[in-house]
Amino acid sequence: MLLRAVRSAFTLIELLVVIAIIAVLIALLLPAVQQAREAARRSQCKNNLKQIGLALHNYHDTFNCFPISMSWGRIDPGTDWDRRQAFSDKVYMLPYLDQSPLYNQTNWNDFPWNPWNTGSNLPQSSRLPVFNCPSNAFTNGNGSNGEFSYAINVGVINYSKDDINVISGTNARHNGFACYTNWPGESDSVVRMAHVSDGTSNTVAYSEFGSVPCDPSSTGRKSMQMHTWAEPGGANPHRLVRQHCLNNVGHVGDCGRHNGRGSSWASSFIGFGSAYSHNMNPNEKPCFATNQGDWRGSTTMSSSSYHTGGVHGLMGDGAVRFLSENIDYNTYASIGTRNGNETVGEF
């Protein structure tokens, strides 16, 4: 009697079951992998701010003040106002971030490199990892040259305790860590450790912001879409400025302006995002400043991020705290000013 050889093989149903099991396992594992990657990116983002904090303190140890940002300047008293010499605090921190060669190539009599005016400072078009949070999901609309996502805290614009009288937070009287100079009659005094009377552990020095593709319809992520001027009229207290930004201000309608934010770490121009304020809570929409010149440092741009639930904030003492987007607004405004003499609770 002849015996037939028995061939072993998967049936179609068995193969489909195996494929289904593999698909389920991938679906279960993928979120965990994504969460692990985001945790690593978030850790690096936090570490970048720690490095910036060390640079701020090392600069202060050397010059007895925190680094300045320069607004519009004049090459000599007879020239018109222009953007030459308008370098950001980041340029002055370069030697303390292991970037001395880049610092030494700076032409101080020309424009900081930026996508609108490249000037002779081409080395400043470098994308430096220490100035970029890896959680940011999009490259700046102008490209990766000069890209950054961390900004110094300029304080609270039109800060008021009684919602009537503005006591600080105006041109030449900013109340955060940022110092804008080089504008006759409207230059901030340099900020020293002694000027942080609220305590360095209670005052934010730096934070982050995210970027998205330009969407003039404002249907995109509103916390990162640039909006126009928060101008309710007159020297309005900061809470009214915030409400006007939230309720009455539309998209900037200009992709050039929108893409400017985060495009030049070397330039101090507010439009490029060199500074942010505590007028708006974390992840609230960013607006331009009320009734003040953005070239002199005033802004109501918010902090924002792709981290779930809030942003990283570098405190004046060098610690990095995670600031919830649901933080009490009065508390957030209080930790945005260096000299408001407020009582700050837990945050």
Image (spheres, helix red, strand yellow):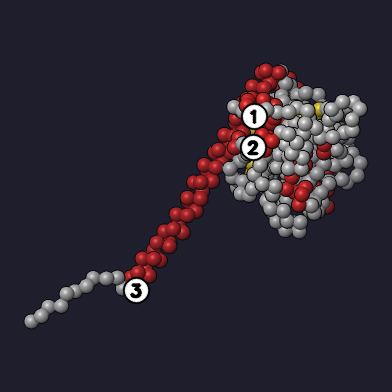
Tag in front: 3 or 2:
2
Secondary structure found at label 3: helix
The residue shown at (37%, 68%) is 17
Extreme residue in the front direction:
120
Tag in front: 3 or 1:
1
Q: Which residue is mark 1?
A: 102
Q: Which residue is mark 3?
A: 12
- Amino acid marked by disc 3: Leu
Secondary structure found at label 1: helix
In contact (CB < 8 Å): disc 1 and disc 2: yes
Image-based side of 208 in relation to 26, left or right: right
In primary-sequence order, the first of circles 3 and 2 is 3
- Amino acid marked by disc 2: Ser
Secondary structure found at label 2: loop
Q: Quadrant of the C terminus?
A: top right
The residue shown at (70%, 47%) is 142
Q: Nearer the viewer, residue 114 or 162?
A: 114
Mark-to-mark CA distance, 3 and 2? 55 Å
Q: Position of residue 346 (x, y in %)?
A: 65, 35
Q: Determine crowd level at label 1: few under 14, some 14-19, many 20+ residues with C-alpha closer than 10 A.
A: some
